[in-house]
Amino acid sequence: MSVLIDSLLAILIVYLALQCLLAPRLTQTVFLFFAFGLALALAWVRLGAVDVAITEAAIASGFLGVLFLDALRDFSFITSGKQESSDAANHSVSKKKPAFLSLPGVVLVLGLGLFLLITLEAVWKVPESGGLTAATEALLPESGVENPVTAVLLNFRAYDTWLEMGVILLGLLAVMAVGGIKIFPVHRKTPEDPVLQQVILFFTPILFLFGAFLLYFGKNGPGGAFQAAVLWGAIGILLHLGGRPVLTVIPRWLSQLLLIMGIGFFLMLGFLLLAGGASLFEYPPSYAGVLILIIETLAAISIAVTLVSVFVHLNQLNKEESN
Amino acid sequence: MTGLPTSPLPALLVGFPILLAILTLFFRPGVKALVGLAGCLLTALLAFIAFVEVTQRGTVIHTPGGWDPPLGILLRMDALAAVFIGMTALVGGFISLYAWRYLRAQDPATGGYPLFWPLWLFLWAGLNGLFLSNDLFNLFVTIEVISICAVALAVLSGKAGALKAGLRYLLAAITGSMAYLFGVALLYGSTGTLDLDHLGQVLEPGTTTTFALLVVTLGLLIKMAGFPFHFWLPPAHSNALAPVSALLSALVVKGAFYILLRLWMEVFGVGITYAAGQLIGLAGAIAVIWGSWQAFMQTSLKLLVAHSSVAQLGYLLMIFPLLILPPGVTADSADWLSVTWTGGVYQVISHAIAKASFFLSAGIVIMAVGHDRIESLRDLVGNMRITSMAIGLAGVSLIGLPPSGGFVGKWMLLKGILLSGQWWWAPVVVAGSLLTAGYVFMLLRLAFAPAREKEPFRPVPKTLEVVALLLAVSSFLIVFPADYLIQFLENSEIFGSGIEAVLKGGFYGND
């Protein structure tokens, strides 16, 4: 039975990926991408990696999907002047014969197929090693948390996670580099939409509570800073769309502090430990649990603010270009 | 764990630049540049302290979190890491000085591209982290940091050409990262470890190992713009701001080469065959000829310099076939190994310095005449003596004429080639040098030629010219400590065992 489910899921993922690539319209591509992300999340659940599944659904499908939809709307806005149909989201990607039917296309497809076969052969032959699971289990009591994933991310390999927090911040800096140097764009008032206002009123507390739940229970089960951050970030994006731009009304230094709080506190803690003669991020065992919770909370806030900033910035950038 | 002395320096080399990068975010654009410059100079100072520490005490390690590998991550600063970190500090320090003056002059309205400083400091931390890391997955994270910074810096000017080239760069960089990560997943899946030392001990030959080695190498080749994956480099490097072009060409591409060198020498012993070495050497040889020829054919100054990078990176790939023993040769008789790999490292350093100087000089010329056609070099000597001299000296080092650093690197490579008996690489080195001489002398001929019409040279800040010249002079000064540096590298215990790993695996690895 489970083999049947897994096979169907595998076929579905490949099918959705292909459809995503071959869809004639960008709108279809984006919605297929949503579906593809969710199918992939299901696959992670089947593989027993619930943490990855939540992150996949939240970031890859949710947040990226929102960015794509936003880009699509602005894209249609830009091209609307040039095309007959004002709904340029229906803009056709390729009107001529698909590229993969030409001779170089056939060679490429065959080459890719061969590569895929070798890949499958290599993956098939991976011997069972168990990885570092045993080592993680053995040292789990010393880590201060009970979820092995959290233990690896925030304690055993905290250095990797700290650098990854830098990567997320760099994502925002890169977006700002593309669009000039404004730290936060000036907000323009959008007309009030009563339905949207109701949605915001209804979802804000739920998203906040659910995020806090994921954050706190990440100590013991699936969940943690990244997953919580996406939910909290969703609040910020909703508020922004509803004409309540939280990030642009608070003072600039405060929004910047919120952005760097996670990585900054983590680093300062590391330096303090270094000064005390320990290694970077070598928490005293009795405080490990508390410290991890503080780091995760601050990191979740920072990541949420970063995600909202990316959205706000791109949103503004596209509007300026289309004007 | 390994009995090596622990030191906080490796942690500081990564943490300190990131702390400064975060700090710069809080300042107004004008102040940001000052804080950023101060941060860069302090980071360079820290790197020199660390370099001296390693020369005195030998290899030092640090385990973040206090967990031993393979569960935890090991940062190790051995001779090779120290040399690369020192090189980054030397070249990066000069480029920072140049950038401070250059960016202000380019864009006075907004205080001169303020985002340059946090991005460059993050990039520096990423490079230091990469050189120190002894963990396959941590290496991936540092590659990510470096790639995002590099792409963001490449598009900083906001011009359409830069954005287009930047997007292509981003796609190539992501493809490279994904290929590398896929290989890492396969290796972790089959061995259960990510620590390089541990992996080198437990890795067994087989389909999975060979395939993992293949995708990891492919990914890194894309990252270091090895032929035929060099397509993204010329547009990305030539469209960036001058100090950014220098950073990308001198330092960023060397990161991927560093990982490739470490993995091939320390880890992949069992999977590497003689044929694989010949293949990667062939890619390097084609890059040398093709890149030099392309450089020779360019009509725009920065594109010429960028294509020259493709060629110079080719030399680095040509050391790999020499590190693998042909059939029937034993480890004891292979006396060319150390001259080859230390020569390769020396080539990395001299190229970094010379190419940085070249790109900075090109930036000065473009600033003075307002466009980057090669014709603009006409009568450069009459107008900008310092910059003419910088271009001349950097060019001589790129050709590999004595007594430049480039000469030492290429000479050692040639020596390795002839000693190993793989003579077929020698004509490539010579032809590459001749082609390089071709485009460098073409530039110099124009620089001495009288001006056709009165094209005005606008005045350029003297600081810029002096920094470019200092770098060019450094590419000659590094000849003096050459003996010392090479001995320092040869005596490092890590590489002693590293070479053995390849020898043991060597040709017979897959049998």
Image (cartoon, coloured by chain):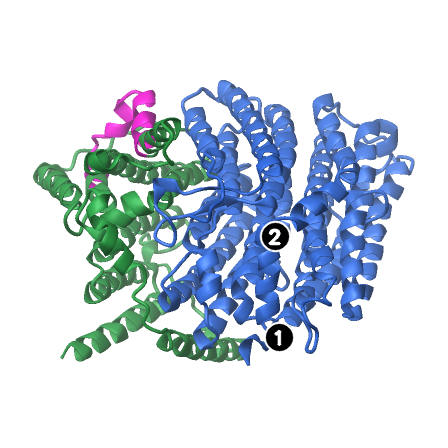
Residue B213 on image: x %, y %: 50, 67
Q: Which chain is green?
A: A
The label shown at residue B507 is 1
Q: Which residue is mark 2?
A: B233
Q: Quadrant of the C terminus of chain B?
A: bottom right
Q: Which residue range is magenta in the image?
A: A234-262
Q: Is residue A30 above or below residue B67?
A: below
Q: Chain of mark 2?
A: B
Image quadrant assignment for residue A51 = bottom left
Q: Main secondary structure of the magenta part?
A: helix
Disc 2 and disc 1 on one polypeptide chain: yes
Camera-nearest residue between B142 and A245: B142
Q: Is residue B200 above or below residue A116?
A: above
Which residue is pictured at 62% across the width and 37% down the height? B55
Q: Amino acid at mark 1?
A: Phe
Residue A199 on image: x %, y %: 11, 41
SS for dot 2: helix
Residue A240 visible in the snapshot? no
Chain B shade in the render:
blue
Query: Which is more N-terminal, label 1 or label 2?
Result: 2
